[in-house]
Amino acid sequence: MRTATLGPAQRAESLAAMAERELDVLVVGAGVVGAGTALDAVTRGLSTGLVEARDWASGTSSRSSKLIHGGLRYLEMLDFALVREALKERGLLLERLAPHLVKPVPFLYPLQHKGWERLYAGSGVALYDAMSMARGHGRGLPMHRHLSRRHALRVAPALKKDALVGALQYYDAQMDDARFVTTLVRTAASYGAQVANRARVTSFLREGERVVGARVQDVEAGGEYEIRAKQVVNATGVWTDDTQSMVGERGQFHVRASKGIHLVVPKDRIHSTTGLILRTEKSVLFVIPWGRHWIIGTTDTDWDLDKAHPAASSADIDYLLEHVNSVLHVPLTRDDVEGVYAGLRPLLAGESDATSKLSREHTVAHPVPGLVVVAGGKYTTYRVMAKDAVDEAVHGLDLRVADCVTEDTPLLGAEGYRALWNARARVAARTGLHVVRVEHLLNRYGALAQEVLELIADDPSLGEPLHAADDYLRAEIVYAASHEGARHLDDVLTRRTRISIETFDRGTRSAREAAELMAPVLGWDKDQIEREVQHYEKRVEAERESQRQPDDLTADAARLGAPDIV
């Protein structure tokens, strides 16, 4: 298997190839479900295309809590099937499919009542671990443990003494959600899928009632392509209803958007060696370790405004700060917040009581011949959603198709990752990089870190960190444009790296240096570099302004003050 390179030339070739002959499956939408669907289809031997209107994971799939988890709170709802399924997927990702991208993370659950709460919560966590082990995929994580108040405060000194009477500690897993999706797309392309971002479906092709493909606009170059396919899969998340409206058919279900926001603060603002999970009146609140930072989230509110750029209001930020400060010895302030991001969950809203329960689960439908719709679900179970979507599409194909093999198909970078990790000191000595830098690259690219190191070998200046975001090497910016399909500065600073939420300047001080590194790969002249930098600065200012607004309506209006560069 060749390792696909998603550079400018590949994108143009893929669009031309998709229009050249009929595909078996065309997937619309390159979030985690769409990318997973493309990988599932192509690894069954189907000719497969994947198109995305903006960037890989530019919607919900880059704005999550970045957790791969079974959903401990769903046990309380007695949704054992959902938890069992998610725990199996968590184990597969940790151990087999993406050990370079998915890592264990500890959480402390403070107990506030003596006696009954330890028994109640402890039973739930014990069941969680038991279900994980029963699936045969729980060996990668330590078992939960009970802590006294004194022990819990040693593990998490940031907590107020009166905020707990004891605690439970258990493990889940986390990943960089946008990086995971980019790796999924590249893996699909490596097996032969044709993939293109900045390629927007403007209408579906019809023959009678049957959907036979899609008309796709190249948003970058302005051309239009007719891509014919035996089956089209709509995997557009919160845009599902908008995409469905193109066929003029009333859907069997609707997708409503629920907004969740997250704050990012520096590691030294919360003194703890473990993440935290806290109950709120509506749901749960996570404090998640994230490199040299913490992610705090999330909220859960209806959103019916702009789907492309959901905005966090001042009220959202205050809500999170108020709840996390209720247990912290030293409270956080607005000045501690480095980054803020908002995402939309695609929740299923049925038209009857029979389908309304689907909101936490996923569903697949075949509303008209030739068109499959997949929606809802959790990030963790993307592979199951993708399998179900392709199974449904296969029913409409007049050929024998192999069963799903993605349970045994590691993502790019997984193969050889552990061997390279064991040899990281030798890699550091050979390349002249500090071993910490090599570890950083291995945990972002796995075995593909060798490709980044080759760029540095050719140009040693790329082995230097970015001046205003020194967690990242200059080579990573070039690699994002040459190998990972980044088309704009925004793609690199918000998704290929997370500079936009990990620095107090939100990436504005890194913008020009990054744009100049991308320019030779993407053929930008000085005017285009200037446009990219100005657009990014306007985007950051619009986001900051939205976060000063009191409510969703005013926040949305402020965020829309910075239009997309495309």
Image (cartoon, rainbow, N blue to C red):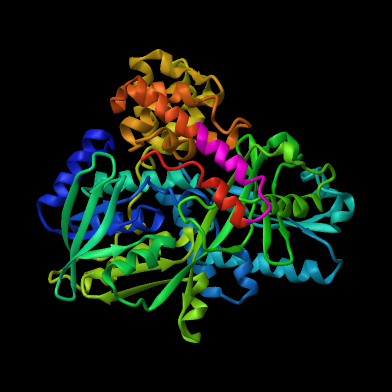
Residue 542 is inside the magenta segment: yes
Q: Residue at x 34, y 55 (%)?
A: 29
Residue 241 appears in the picture as rendered = yes
Residue 502 coordinates in the image, percent (x, y): 59, 35
Left or right of 210, for residue 78: right
Position of residue 109 relative to residue 350, above or below, is above
Left or right of 11, for residue 295: right
Q: Quadrant of residue 266?
A: top right
Residue 471 coordinates in the image, percent (x, y): 55, 27
Pick out the residue farthest to the left: 21
Give the tally of numbered discs. 0
Residue 275 coordinates in the image, percent (x, y): 68, 48
Position of residue 2 relative to residue 256, above or below, is above
Q: Magenta segment, which residues?
A: 537-551
**Foreground pick, 458 / 447:** 458
Please identify the dominant SS of the magenta region: helix
Pick out the residue farthest to the bottom: 353
**Foreground pick, 460 / 130:** 460
Residue 1 coordinates in the image, percent (x, y): 22, 42
Q: Residue at x 60, y 30 (%)?
A: 505
Q: Residue at x 23, y 50 (%)?
A: 193
Quarter containing the C terminus: top left
Residue 20 is inside the magenta segment: no
Position of residue 167 relative to residue 421, above or below, is below
Left or right of 70, for residue 219: left
Residue 65 appears in the picture as rendered = no
Q: Quadrant of residue 205?
A: bottom left
